[in-house]
Image (cartoon, rainbow, N blue to C red):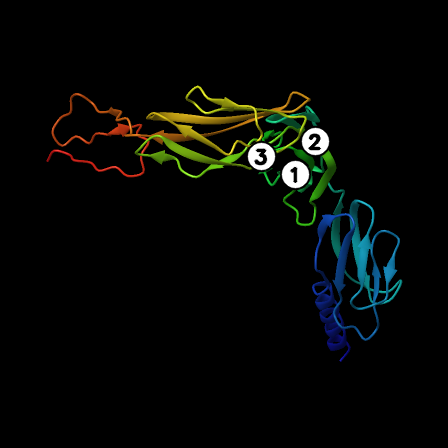
Amino acid sequence: MKQFKLSLFLFVHFAFANAQSADITQGCLPLTVKFEAPTNPSGYFWSFGDGNSSELQFPEHIYINAGDYLVELFEVEGGFKIGEINIEVYQKPIISFNASTLVGCTPLTVNFTSSVSTDPRLGNQSYLWSFGDGAKSNDKNPSYTYTNPGLMSVSLEVTTEIEGCETTELKTEYILVEGPIAAFEIDKIYSCTFPVEININTAGTFSSENVYLWDFGDGQSSSEFAPQSITYESEGLFIISQTVTSPEGCSSTFKDTVLVGSPPLELDVPSIACQKDSIVLAHNIFAEFLDWDLPK
């Protein structure tokens, strides 16, 4: 009978030693861990390894300092040891970044440089930059060109192979991109007949201090902000351009093309080809529709 009781006692404690658990065993500060102990009529005593303890069956503990912790579970304080769990707590990556220039005219090219200090046990890092105008990059040290003016907030998020160990650095209103915006729309891009009037709808930035220069591609020009229309008296392929220059010297240019009359035919066809060879018929024709008549 005594031998049976001893065997039962060893069995119960063997089961205890394999039953304690934690929902997470590694992570970054602050790390919240939920522990679970097997049912024990005698009670529970958890030692979390950082000087704190609990007598609950299902305690939750927050680690606020990085380190390796041995968590021990006892039946009662000072009693039989049921089991143990190793918990690894890491410092989150420490990141910073800087930019090669903080103020400039569009298009403004900025080179960004990141600095990352991290625990090697976190594994590889991945990068996500947000440049403040909707554009993003996964490069460690990206170069980006701003094409629209504005005050841009820039952020860098660094993630690791350990979940919950991501870190973000945000610099609000970090990059000032200066410059006006040139933009316009025309009511038609081609006309078979001439003279033809092209109506212009200006949609760019207006300021009485800006200088506006229009070039209509046929020798005509304008310094108005919003000329209403342009009339072409002859056929041709005309490029309309608007350039806006601010008092700071920042400029922006927008262009569109108008075809008046028959489209010029420019084909690039190889002079020699073998039977059953595939050839590419390259063209630079400004037209809405093309009707090809190819020999059979």
Query: Which of pointers 3 and 2 lies earlier in the amino acid sequence?
Result: 2
Q: How many marks?
A: 3
Q: Label 3 is placed on what type of residue?
A: Gly
Q: CA distance from mark 3 to mark 2?
A: 22 Å
Q: Residues within 10 Å of mark 3 (few under 14, many from 20)?
A: some
Residue 96, image x, y percentages: 73, 33
The secondary structure type at the circle numbered 3 is loop
Q: Residues within 10 Å of mark 2 (few under 14, many from 20)?
A: many
User: Relative to the observer, which residue lies in front, 120 or 30?
Assistant: 30
Residue pictured at 72% horizontal, 49% vertical:
27
Name the residue tied to disc 1: 132
Label 2 near label 3: C-beta < 8 Å? no
Residue 215, image x, y percentages: 48, 23
Say if residue 27 shows up in the picture: yes
Query: Which of pointers 1 and 3 lies earlier in the amino acid sequence?
Result: 1
Name the residue at the bottom extreme. 1
Residue 105, image x, y percentages: 64, 25
- Return the mark for residue 175: 2
Label 2 near label 1: C-beta < 8 Å? yes
Residue pictured at 80% horizontal, 68% vertical:
57
Name the residue tied to disc 3: 204
Q: Label 1 is placed on what type of residue?
A: Gly
Say if residue 95 shows up in the picture: no
| For discs 1 and 3, the disc positioned in front in the rendered view | 3
Q: Residues within 10 Å of mark 1 (few under 14, many from 20)?
A: some
User: Relative to the observer, which residue lies in front, 34 or 126?
Assistant: 126
Q: Label 2 is placed on what type of residue?
A: Ile
